[in-house]
Image (tube, coloured by chain):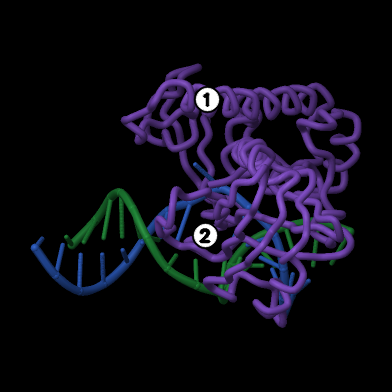
Chain colours: A purple, B green, C blue
Amino acid sequence: MPELPEVEHTRRTLAGWLPGGVIDAVRVHDPRILDPGVTPAAVARHLVGHRLGRVERKGKWLRITLDRGALFSHLGMTGRWVRPAGDDEVRFAKVELQVTRRGATRRVVYADARLLGRFAIADRDIAAWTALGPDPLHDGIDPDALAVRLARRSGPIKPVLLDQAVLAGIGNIQATEGLFFAHVDPRRPARDLSRREIGALARGLLRSIAETMAQQDADLTYVNESGSDNPFTIYGREGTACPRCRATLSKIVLGGRGTVFCTGCQR
DNA sequence: AACGGAACCTGAAAGC
DNA sequence: TGCTTTCAGGTTCCGT
């Protein structure tokens, strides 16, 4: 379930598991997660015996530096990295690394039910990584640069926000919430937003990211048993009253993605 | 260059 | 209860 906040959370987790470790075995549970033409044997050859370095994130991509090249991981919709206890089986396991670090050997597993993620090893940065636009956490969101991008887009603003070359890491939830915080209707042609609205949108997106990350930290601090409650302001709340103006929240499809918004206070 | 729509894949939830 | 349909927080490809 990854947008930028969750991928950043994954990055921090992996940063506590991997750097300095050596991969002493690799097991590919499902080769379909590999790029076309890449074999499990080739993956093992590239990884086994090599040392893991920094874990970095740009947008929704993770880059794990190796002593030669890097491992690139994208979680798609359902990907996650786990470190199981003992020999516990991991549901939907796709690739498993056996990592020895500080004298301890652990299994680090990439699992992905829907197979929409990516697992790639390369000697240089892959195109998907280099094509990414600025990352909101590392670079902030510069309203002027965003305005330049939006000026040549005639389609609705919301799908444009999901374009990873415009901003890296914005997903359906962050786009939905950011537009709400900015009072901007997701159907508005991107090029029609005023400079003031773009500024509000930049702040709204950053606010959405910050709130989601704070929520994640809270979930770790206080065990959340009820797991089903929706932590978002309007995402997933169609049909209920807008928390700002009390109009009923609508849901439409834009660019093939469900989009919740308020016709009362998003213009 | 950029747009809308379909495709990729499969589990979980909702509908009947 | 059990079968069917719908939906899912992502990306990529294809035709226009």
Please provide percent x and percent y for residue B8. Answer: 56, 74
Residue closer to the observer: A49 or A249 = A49
Q: CA distance from mark 2 to mark 1?
A: 23 Å
Image point 82% across, 50% down: which residue? A132
Q: Chain of mark 2?
A: A
User: How many neighbours does mark 1 have within 10 angstroms: few (below 14), some (14-19), or many (20 or more)?
Assistant: some
Q: Splitting the image into 4 quarters, where does residue A24 fall?
A: bottom right
Q: How many marks?
A: 2
Image point 65% across, 52% down: which residue? A100
Q: Splitting the image into 4 quarters, where does residue A266 fall?
A: top right
Please provide percent x and percent y for residue A71. Answer: 75, 58
In this rendering, is residue A182 above or below A102? above
Image point 57% across, 57% down: which residue? A110
Q: Is residue A233 visible?
A: yes
Residue closer to the observer: A168 or A190 = A168
Please provide percent x and percent y for residue A20. Answer: 75, 45
Residue closer to the observer: A50 or A262 = A50
Image point 68% across, 79% down: which residue? A41
Disc number placed over residue A112 in the picture, else none: 2
From the viewer's perspective, is the residue at label 2 or at label 1 nearer? 2
Residue that carries the numbered disc 1 in the rendered image = A215
Q: In the picture, which quadrant includes the C terminus of chain A?
A: top right
Disc number placed over residue A129 in the picture, else none: none
